[in-house]
Amino acid sequence: MSNNAQAIQTDRGSYQNTLQWVMVAVLVYLLICAVGVIGGGFKMAAGGQAKELFAFASNPFAGLVVGIVATALIQSSSTVTSIIVGLVAGGLPVELAVPMIMGANVGTSITNTIVSLGHVRAKEEFKRAFSAATVHDFFNLLSVIIFLPLEIAFGLLEKVGGMFAGMFFGTGDSSIKSFNFVKAATAPVVNVFKSAGKSMGDQPGGVMMIILGIVLIFIAITLVGKLLKKLMVGKAKDIMHTAIGRGPISGITSGTLVTILVQSSSTTTSLMVPLAGSGAFKLKDIYPFTLGANIGTCVTAVLAATAVTGNAEAALQIAFIHLVYNILGVVVIYGAPFLRNLPIKAAESLGDLAAENKFAALGYILGVFFVFPAVCLGISNVI
């Protein structure tokens, strides 16, 4: 190939790369606008009766089920948490949203568990892959077991999230109220949707805005994920290979960074499954990376919460609750020696069982993502 041809090909590649980054920026802007549209629509439709509309989720166990099932169906915790932020901005009480956020963490685990089924024909590979996939599940389930009772009894996460949100919405010129260019940038788009909604009447227009906002979030996150995979997955794999096995801090940090880069904890954890199945990494090396993925996935909701209209402080509060919940999960579970290895031991035992009996893998998926939610609903009806 001549030098001129190589130069043209390089320029073309650079142009395409730049165009893709511009598209990512536009889609992130669309995502932030969509969260604002949901908040405005929910506030318009609810008419101050948001709590009554979500009376079915007033029990924390029912809220947990909403988060699990919604995320398992949509296959994106970022999408579900962004929708929850929008609903809180529109008037959904924070205390009802906290269990939904916890449930979203559990629901997102189904993706990498399904990915591990691709190794089902090779017994040893499947054992390693299924263990690597389910260690994420067991960690998230253990987090719910620890923090949901604390939230019910003391409102721990709600208070901590409120404290952080209050820092940004405090008095004085340094508060986010005084300088929020993101909200200003998205206001014209959100106002167009509001005007269109009001022309239809409050309730029909509000419902229309909620539906359009959810569709826009789903489209934006899906397309951003695809673009970032093209742009960053190669770099993400390099980070993984560089960091995994070099200690827990390195693993957690790199897991957080990679998830921020690809905007999907499901993608991050699913990347590890074939690597574990091949024997390239051990489960104890992959485990910290998984914890980092939980933290990295919170960035989307925090970003979206900076631009919402309506109850903006509560929206930022629930976004911070998601972040604090995942950080505390890492600190408490990984920091406590008697808790640290429980997800690993459970995942290894399940991997051994699934390798011997493939129906055990199916039973596990049905149990966590269908039976467990059903049990939670049963408990919610009794309480």
Image: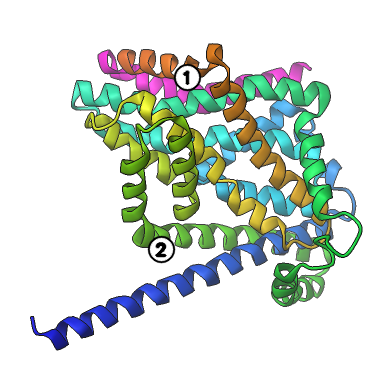
- Residue 192, compared with residue 68, is above or below; it is below
> Quick check: can you spot residue 267?
yes
- Residue 235, compared with residue 122, is above or below; it is below
Going 43% across and 36% down the picture, which residue do you hit? 251
Check disc 2 and give the amino acid type.
Answer: Leu
Query: Are the residues tagged 2 and 1 within 8 Å (C-beta)?
Result: no
- 310 with respect to 229 (left or right): right
Q: Nearer the viewer, residue 57 or 89?
A: 89
Q: Nearer the viewer, residue 114 or 5?
A: 5
Going 74% across and 28% down the picture, which residue do you hit? 60
- 163 with respect to 239 (left or right): right
Label at residue 291? none
Going 75% across and 73% down the picture, which residue do you hit? 184
Q: Estimate the x, y position of residue 344 in percent, counting from the top left.
A: 43, 19
Q: Estimate the x, y position of residue 171 in percent, counting from the top left.
A: 91, 57
User: Is residue 367 in the magenta section?
Assistant: yes
Q: Nearer the viewer, residue 48 or 128?
A: 128
- 64 with respect to 234 (left or right): right
Check disc 1 and give the amino acid type.
Answer: Pro
Identify the residue under disc 2: 227
Q: Secondary structure at mark 1?
A: helix
Q: Main secondary structure of the magenta part?
A: helix
Residue at the extreme bottom of the image, as rendered: 4
Q: Estimate the x, y position of residue 64 in percent, counting from the top left.
A: 66, 31
Q: Nearer the viewer, residue 333 or 68?
A: 333
Residue segment shown in magenta: 354-383
Identify the residue under disc 1: 343
Q: What is the distance, in whole Å, between disc 2 and disc 1 at their CAs?
A: 33 Å
